[in-house]
Structures are given as structure tokens and as C-alpha cells.
Image (cartoon, grey):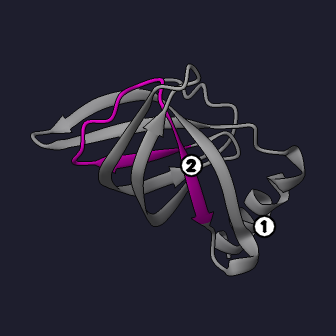
């Protein structure tokens, strides 16, 4: 299968907790307490796994630390894809929303560090 991603995916080992989700029309889902395991990241988004069922087209706030505190990103993330991996585990694709292009250097530095 041809990879049609705009940016190279980098393998990472990050854990996040989603406590609430929201949609643009002010619909909120609170008290989710959904731990997720980020499996890869790119300049455009993240891939992650969770045992929780999360709705597609919802957003959440994320704080991502790529290596050290100086490489910390705060972003809104939109869930765009959900696949059932096996019983009780789901794989998600999500894109960064409104990430300033000035922060793209963080991904370049992370990729350089990981390739050494």
C-alpha cells in the first residue's frame, strides 16, 4: 500500500490522558479519563492506541514532550480515524489543529536526535 502521508512518521513512546473532548459547536464530553499510548508522531498529527472508544471528529488538548522540556508542544488535536485493532484496543489517527509553523523545528530536531 502506498503511503500518502504528507510528513514522515516518527516512532515515539509517549503516554497521554484525555480528560475531556469537545466539538466546534460547543459540545463537550467530560470525565473521560482515557489513557492513550502515542505510537507515532509527525509534523501533521499523531497515531495512538487506547482501550477507550473515542468519537471521531472530536478534539482534545494535548501536551507533548519530545525528549526534553524545551521540546514541549501544546496543541489541539482532532481525532480523524478509528480502527479496531483487536478486542478492547482501538487505534486512532489524529491531526494537529492550529499548530504554528514556527514550531515545526521541534520535529526536525527530534528526528535528527532519533536518527543518531
Q: Which residue position is annotated with label 1?
A: 109
Quarter of image, res 111: bottom right
Q: Residue furthest bottom?
A: 68
Proximity of marks 1 and 2: CB atoms separated by less than 8 Å:
no
Quarter of image, res 21: top left
- When the figure is inspected, residue 101 is found, relative to residue 59, above or below; the finding is below
Left or right: 88 as drawn, with respect to 104: left
User: Which one is in front, 58 or 3?
Assistant: 58
Local packing at callout 1 (Cα closer than 10 Å; few below 14, some 14-19, many 20+) is few
Q: Which residues are magenta?
A: 46-64
Secondary structure beneath label 2: strand
Local packing at callout 2 (Cα closer than 10 Å; few below 14, some 14-19, many 20+) is some
- When the figure is inspected, residue 63 is found, relative to residue 59, above or below; the finding is below
- When the figure is inspected, residue 40 is found, relative to residue 97, above or below; the finding is below
Q: Residue at image x 47%, y 44%?
A: 47
Residue 61: numbered disc: 2
User: Which one is in front, 8 or 81?
Assistant: 81
Q: Residue at image x 43%, y 54%?
A: 39
Assign the C terminus to one quadrant of the image.
bottom right
Mark 1 or mark 2: which is in front? 2
Asked if residue 34 is among those painted magenta in the image, a careful observer would answer no
Residue 53: numbered disc: none
Assign the N terminus to one quadrant of the image.
top left
Q: Earlier in the sequence, mark 1 or mark 2?
A: 2
Picture coordinates of residue 109, whole percent (x, y): 78, 67
Secondary structure beneath label 1: helix
Left or right: 54 as drawn, with respect to 115: left
Amino acid at each position: 500500500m502506498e503511503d500518502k502521508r504528507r510528513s514522515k512518521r516518527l516512532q515515539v513512546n509517549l503516554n497521554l490522558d484525555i480528560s475531556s473532548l469537545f466539538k466546534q459547536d460547543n459540545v463537550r464530553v467530560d470525565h473521560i479519563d482515557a489513557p492513550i499510548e502515542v505510537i507515532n508522531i509527525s509534523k501533521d498529527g499523531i497515531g495512538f492506541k487506547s482501550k477507550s472508544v473515542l468519537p471521531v471528529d472530536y478534539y482534545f488538548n494535548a501536551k507533548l514532550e519530545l525528549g526534553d522540556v524545551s521540546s514541549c508542544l501544546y496543541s489541539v488535536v482532532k481525532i480523524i480515524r478509528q480502527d479496531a485493532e483487536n478486542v478492547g484496543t482501538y487505534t486512532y489517527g489524529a491531526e494537529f489543529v492550529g499548530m504554528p509553523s514556527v514550531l515545526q523545528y521541534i520535529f526536525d530536531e527530534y528526528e535528527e536526535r532519533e536518527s543518531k
